[in-house]
Image (cartoon, grey):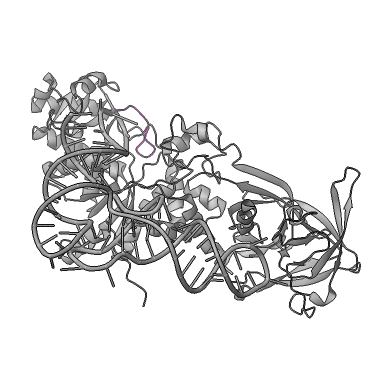
Amino acid sequence: MSEEKSLNFIEEIVEADLNSGKYQSILTRFPPEPNGYLHIGHAKSICLNFGLAKKYGGKTNLRFDDTNPSTEETEYVDSIKEDVKWLGFEWAEELYASNYFEQLYQFAVQLIEKGLAYVDDSSSEAIATEKGTPTQPGIENTFRSRSVAENLQLFADMRAGKYQDGEKVVRAKIDMASPNMHMRDPIIYRIKHAHHHRTGDKWCVYPMYDFAHGQSDSIENITHSICTLEFIPHRPLYEWCIEKLEIFPSKQYEFARLNMTYTVMSKRKLLQLVNENHVNGWDDPRMSTISAMRRRGYPAESIREFCDKIGVAKRENLIDFSLLEFCVREQLNKTAYRRMVVFDPLKIIITNYPDTTELLESENNPEDLSTGTRSIPFSKELYIEKEDFMEVAPKKYFRLSPGQMVRLKSAYIIKCDEVVKDDNGNVKELLCSYIPESKSGSDTSGINVKGTLHWVSVATSINAEIRLYDRLFKVEDVANAEGDFKDYINADSLQVISNAYAEPALKTDDPSIGFQFIRKGYFVIDRDSTNDQLVFNRTVSLKDGWAKEAKKA
RNA sequence: UGCCUGAUAGUAUAAUGGUAGUACGACUGUUUUUGGUGCAGUUUGUCUUGGUUCGAAUCCAGGUCGGGCAACCA
């Protein structure tokens, strides 16, 4: 019935490995460094790694790549775990590269014993110089020929804390003339007298990424180690270590990282936005972090759907941010409760309506009638949106104007009889009349109107703060824009409406559900809300057909 | 100027030697008590030049263009 979705290139590899009997089941891993918050790019990797295991009956480990104590913190570990869980995935084991520090140290000892690693006393500048350039081979220095015994002693002394940071490193002895820069005797251990968030002060030597990642994969028996394209040049080294150490041969595969329009995806840049107060923290709803999207009201399911839609390939990409927004709307349209909120009020008085309050019923969600209805108080004095009235209306304008009729959503059809102005000639309020037979659900008026407006009753409305978010950057391809990315920050990315008028149901609604403010967009209650003041974040706007039509004119 | 990688509608992604398809976007119509949603339809593409083949997006060779690599970061 439904069409078979074609496999991405990694799924093909997995299926081939399973069909050939190379593996009985697969084990993947998601390996973040706990030095920042996860962003939507990580979500792609999470969905890939966990999704693969789920699809093929395998498992996925959550492994923190915590080999650099100077940048890593427990705060980040906690946020990462929360984000992965919120996205809807469960890891088989929670592991840390730091769990393997002793084992990793012994691996380096083994390499030294085999004459495949040595202690180098050179400065980092000297090492960089001797490394050569991509077009010129590097040169071998005198430390390279130290004896095994001396290397062993020196490495033990490094571990014992006899040297200062930078005094010595351990290098793999591979090939200083290799066309691959990563194979020119890469550093595998360095001295860092730093406090580690898990191992404390136990260690003062730490393995480099290239000497920790592959080995960690191998120790855990990871079958498919999936990373991004920039690690392709590291693969020969990944394989060299596994071969020389004679350990489980995990395989590395690379896919193109996610790039999105109007945002940045590097931890360094996100950190900068936070530290320099361009945004209000890692979970500022304008950020590309998972925690920001959660706070903004993006459902986890829509992020998973997005990751599924964008696919997995090796080509560099720049995905339209609007595709993510499409996924969010698609999900929220099915689940969000409809409510009415007026952002910029214009008072109307229904002159022929009695001085009473009537309760009208309206669906919570017309897409899902099982969600029931709520009552909305209707009375003589109402607010409508200022932009829903024009004294002189252009053609195709279906909203209110003098002498014209519109329907008030779930209520009555009204007609604008008179415009009341203040001394300056500004529209102050509208005098309207309603059609009693036009009540929603029992309309016998026979009148058809083109426009339907949202509204709230003045007397029963409640105050709310609305935060409207726009793209954080003004250009599509921020990472490739010339100059400093901060020059492209959109100064108007946050607009706050401090006194919107909301229908009273919102006061008692479950704060965890998503809302659609009719004709306005999708909104979610922010954690800054108090008992006295509701605060809403706009998750995403509705598609606006009229804005497009109006632009044409 | 070395090595590694990639190139299919505007953006992504599929077709694995046999009809270039799908999604988002855009546009048109239709439904609608949200100018939302839904439904129907239209639109635009194989980087280039040769070669192999009955047949090439796919295989081969050359070119062009893009990305990555010279952290005691990951």
Image: magenta residue range? A191-200
Q: Residue at x 52, y 40 (%)?
A: A473
Q: Residue at x 40, y 45 (%)?
A: A259
| Residue A130 visible from this viewpoint | yes
- Which SS does the magenta portion mostly show? loop
Q: Which quarter of the figure has residue A392?
A: bottom right
Q: Indicate whether A480 appears above or below B54.
A: above
The answer to whether residue A195 is magenta is: yes
Q: Position of residue A458 (x, y in %)?
A: 82, 58
Q: Residue at x 48, y 59 (%)?
A: A302
Q: Residue at x 35, y 32 (%)?
A: A201
Q: Position of residue A220 (x, y in %)?
A: 24, 51
Quadrant of the snapshot with the N terminus of chain A: bottom left
Q: Indicate whether A486 appears above or below A334.
A: above
* Position of residue A256 in the picture relative to residue B54 (left or right): right
Q: Position of residue A443 (x, y in %)?
A: 77, 78
Taking depth in this image into account, of A352 and A56 the one nearest to the observer is A352
The answer to whether residue A287 is magenta is: no
Q: Indicate whether A137 appears above or below A370.
A: above
Taking depth in this image into account, of A481 and A293 the one nearest to the observer is A481
Q: Indicate whether A59 appears above or below A428.
A: below
Q: Which quarter of the figure has residue A408?
A: bottom right
| Residue A156 visible from this viewpoint | no
